[in-house]
Amino acid sequence: MSEMTIITDLSQVPDFESKVEEATFWAAHAFAPDLLNAENAVADDLLPPVRPRKSNPTSLRLSADLESRLRHLALLKQTSYQTLLKEFVLERVYEEEKRLRVI
């Protein structure tokens, strides 16, 4: 097995004509550890910017009847049932916060 060639500068990475050419190149080459360091500005340029998450996914079990009713209401309001459910939860949380004098 041949030794890996260590890439110490991004200028050492050629423009590839095909995926096969790229795969062949990376089978024999690897980035130096300092290029992979997240604190290194050059390595940061290799990655797309990370968008902050606007919401967190959650799981919720609904009865078939409730889901059907929710979907029907969402259809009437011309929105998705997930969006409608988020609106309902937000409104209810706001009402509870008012009732408990949190806000």
Image (tube, rainbow, N blue to C red):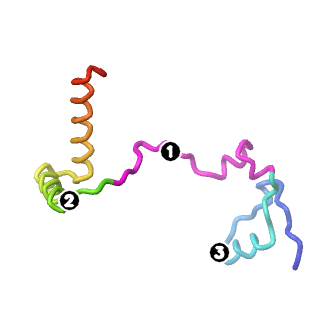
Compared to residue 15, the image places residue 50 above or below, namely above
Quadrant where the image shows the C terminus:
top left
Residue 77 on image: x %, y %? 13, 49
Residue 94 on image: x %, y %? 25, 30
Q: Residues within 10 Å of mark 1 (few under 14, many from 20)?
A: few
| Helix, strand or loop for disc 1 | loop
Residues shaded magenta:
34-59
Quadrant where the image shows the N terminus:
bottom right
Query: Residue visible at 20% across and 59% down?
Result: 63
Chain-order first, disc 2 or disc 3: 3
Residue 35 on image: x %, y %? 77, 51
Residue kind at label 1, given as amino acid type: Arg
Residue kind at label 2, given as amino acid type: Ser
Q: Residue 97 appears in which quarter of the rendering?
A: top left
Left or right of 31? Residue 102 is: left
Q: Which residue is mark 2?
A: 63
Residue kind at label 3, given as amino acid type: Ser
Disc on res. 51: 1
| Helix, strand or loop for disc 3 | loop
Q: Residues within 10 Å of mark 3 (few under 14, many from 20)?
A: few
Dominant secondary structure, magenta: loop
